[in-house]
Image (cartoon, rainbow, N blue to C red):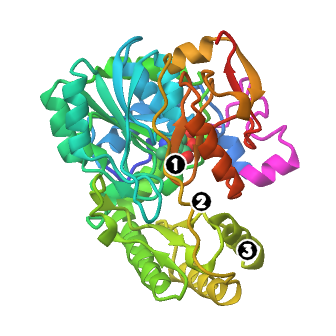
Amino acid sequence: MMDQRRAPIAEAMRRYAGDGALAFHTPGHKQGLGAHRLLRELVTEEGLREEVSLMAELDDLHAPATCIREAQALAASLYGADAAYFMVNGTTGAIQAMLMAVLRPGDEVLLPRNAHRSVLGAIVLSGAHPVYLQPEVHEGMGIAMGLPPETVAKAVRKHPEARALVMVSPTYYGVASDLRRIAEILHRHGMLLLVDEAHGAHLRFSDDLPPQAMDAGADMAAQSTHKLLGSMTQSSLLLVRKGRVDLGRVQWAAGILQTTSPNQLLLASLDIARLQMAERGEELVGRAVRLSEELRRAVNGTDGLSAFGRECMTTPGASALDVTKVTVSVRGLGMSGAEAEHILRHAYKIQCELADAYHVLFIVSYADTQREVERLRDSLADLAGTYRKGSSFSLGCALPETPPQRMTPREAFFSPSVEVDFEKSIGQVSAEQVMFYPPGIPILCPGEEITAECVDYVKRMKALGLKATGAIDIELRSIRVLSST
Ligand SMILES: Cc1ncc(COP(=O)(O)O)c(C=O)c1O
């Protein structure tokens, strides 16, 4: 039985700083001695005193033997994984390590198109060939829902050589897919389930939330501890089930992709976030679940607003909802999510997590109490009463067909590219990803042919005032295409 009341990394740091060894080592601020006042105010004297790294007492992230090894073992035990890796380049780094550990150049990988850009980056790095799958889109809300197990079964039959499926669950909007069934299908065919669980670090601590990927049979899951729990931005966990995955290769891949000078404060914050969940996870996440349901009820009782709940999880692909993501539709007020975000930010001093054409999304986390949630509830009610602009509107644009894939994202990345006028780019091969929220599904991925349908869709979305994400020119007046085409 492991002692979850310990925080080995944080303890080793305090011991080292307390020992008073004179610092002739990195980092250059020398335990705060040379730190500018502003940095000192930001990080605190004690934080700077303990911000050392690479000392024997503090272990080595790339060959952990003492406190990091112990802290990672505690995290693995709390999360029910066989191994946990502390990651200091966010979930982006965790996803890259996850894919690099198991994919080889040329391997086929099944990939729902609502993948985060970090997954596409990992595809470029690994040289794997993506086989794109289309997730379900909720017609009324326009957002990407989950991936139906039936879609996975079909893809597995069509691509029996595929090595793995990489998918996001839950989505940014909190929609979880049926990972148990998906894992069964994949494993039956010798394939791996790799989950981008950036939005799922808290799931294990409440039975009212969807099961986390590790508990549903996934082989690996990348979690943003920093997004939904209490570690510092940039710190994430990579959780692994051994058997189909070689742990040595995971460590190796993480070592290639991460700095050799990991920030000790980030590592300690992961250690402490795990300790906090071990001590009070069920109580705190349970409170977030209760408060978010109260908020959802209040929103649904407000004229002009609505927030979908578990009742919407009947859409194919959607299996369960993380209710702590409260997605409020402002369509009934005749305004866009971006307009509502602006008003909430400036008139009410409330910042949402995400705004799309129809919605503003709020995260109720373990840190929130009745007070914060009541303020949000009252502000939303006031917004609906004061700022109503007119009747509901609809984008009414169906997603274009997935364009023909002319080459892999890796080939596209390494090919010379030029910037061209977007409206004149039909027939060329895109070097970039282009996506709108909703639905958060790319209409173009690197290596795909730009079709007239795509250009037309972009024109219509832009006319509605929506901004693209993924491309360098967010106005999409221009796009980078491969120069050899
Ligand atoms: C679904 C998803 N996956 C991966 C990431 C990458 O996480 P990080 O910002 O920690 O690198 C994000 C970040 O927003 C995300 O939303």
Give the alpha-carbon distance from disc 1 to disc 2, as whole Å.
9 Å
Which is more toward the observer, 27 or 336?
336
Asked if one can make out residue 421 in the rendered structure from this viewpoint, the answer is yes
> Disc 1 vs disc 2: Cβ atoms closer than 8 Å?
yes
Residue type, mark 3 in image: Ile
Identified at 37% across, 57% down, the residue is 175
The residue labelled by disc 3 is 343
Q: Earlier in the sequence, mark 1 or mark 2?
A: 2
Q: Residues within 10 Å of mark 1 (few under 14, many from 20)?
A: many
Say if the magenta span includes residue 29.
Answer: yes
Please provide the residue range marked out in magenta: 19-43
Q: Residues within 10 Å of mark 3 (few under 14, many from 20)?
A: some
Say if the magenta span includes residue 401.
Answer: no
Which is more toward the observer, 101 or 51?
101
Q: Residue 8 is drawn in which quadrant?
A: top left
Which is more toward the observer, 324 or 149?
149
The residue labelled by disc 2 is 356
- Discs 3/2, front: 2
The residue labelled by disc 1 is 440
Q: Residues within 10 Å of mark 2 (few under 14, many from 20)?
A: many
Ligand 1 lies under 8 Å from the Cβ of mark 1: no
Identified at 40% across, 28% down, the residue is 98
SS for tag 3? helix
Quadrant of the frame with the C terminus = top right
